[in-house]
Image: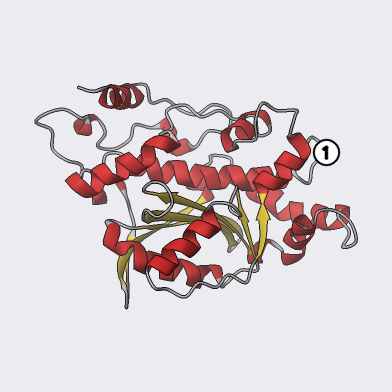
Amino acid sequence: MDFVSIRKRLRLLSRTALKSGSPAELQEPRPGHDAALPSTGYNPVRLEKVIRGQEVATTAGKFLLIDRSASEIVSSAGEFVSRYSYCFRRGAAAISQESGPIDLVKFVKCGPRKSVFLDIETTGLCGSPLFLAGLLFYREGGLLVRQLFARDYSEERPLLGHLLELLDEFEIVVTFNGKSFDIPYIKDRCSYNTLPFRLELHHLDLLHEYRRRWKGVLPDCRLQTLESRICYRYREGDIPGNEIPEAYHDFVRTGDAWQIKDILHHNAFDLITMSELTLRLFTSDT
């Protein structure tokens, strides 16, 4: 057994709840994981056993769409949604249209219903397929996490087409390093899949805002560093981002979905963290 397999075993065996504001979902055993430990003689975990999603059929093909409320990811969702709504009133009062970073001004002007958070997961470096796009937005009094998942490489094209349609419903997109990574990556994959790319949204990149405020104070401005230092929340048992491409390739090759729920949760929790970091830009403690 190689080092990566041993590390995966240890990660599964040491799965525990996140500290302080941890997702309720991680406080319970993951279905199917015990049976799916990488070893000889085990039965692969089927995708439908770990994902409750809806197949979306488009003219370009099919993909899987997963909707979850924020309360399924963060136990304190009710309080969080109240703070999210309040931030626009407080933010609009605190930032005049004549001062403050222009992207933050546009964010509070657009309001909660026209703002969307975006985070993608890819199969490797630039030029390789994108297989997951996560969105978080305000709907019907709550925050909704919507994830578009390609079950194999051929489903990238319909996923991208639907993603562009969804983004057209909003006025501002919020990312973390999205100006350098997410948006250029989506544009490149649209070009590869012969899809017209147009994105007429304002763009708030949280990495730029936090570098402006915290560069030289924190050891770095990585998302999980900000999560621990600004949101006071720590992840345990999370799948490392650098293992996600290999985990997805394994799923496509074998059909074993034992790590897919981890990937979806990692992506959803990144979105929740991004939204909380956005709120904290309007509070005095940042």
Tell me, what colour scheme is on the image? secondary structure
The quarter in which the N terminus is drawn is top left
Tally of numbered tags: 1
Give coordinates of residue 141: x percent, y percent.
61, 60
Q: Residue at coordinates 31% horizontally, 27% vertically from top-left?
A: 8
Label 1 packing within 10 angstroms: few (<14), some (14-19), many (20+)? few
**Observer-nearest residue: 99 or 93?**
99
Q: Can residue 71 be seen in this view?
A: yes
The quarter in which the C terminus is drawn is top right
Give coordinates of residue 139: x percent, y percent.
57, 63
Residue closest to the far left: 41
Left or right, residue 19 beside residue 193: right
Q: In this view, does 85 lie above or below 242?
A: below
Q: Residue at coordinates 60% horizontally, 48% vertically from top-left?
A: 177
Residue 162, quarter of the rendered image = bottom left
Q: In this view, does 126 lie above or below 64?
A: above
Q: Residue at coordinates 35% horizontally, 62% vertically from top-left?
A: 156
Q: Residue at coordinates 52% horizontally, 47% vertically from top-left?
A: 71
**Observer-nearest residue: 131 or 185?**
185
Give coordinates of residue 32: x percent, y percent.
24, 37
Left or right, residue 222 beside residue 49: right
Left or right, residue 265 beside residue 58: right
Instruction: Identify the residue position indicated by label 1 in the image.
Output: 284
Amino acid on which the number 1 mark rests in the picture: Ser
What SS does tag 1 mark? Answer: loop
Give coordinates of residue 284: x percent, y percent.
83, 38
Q: Can residue 73 be seen in this view?
A: no
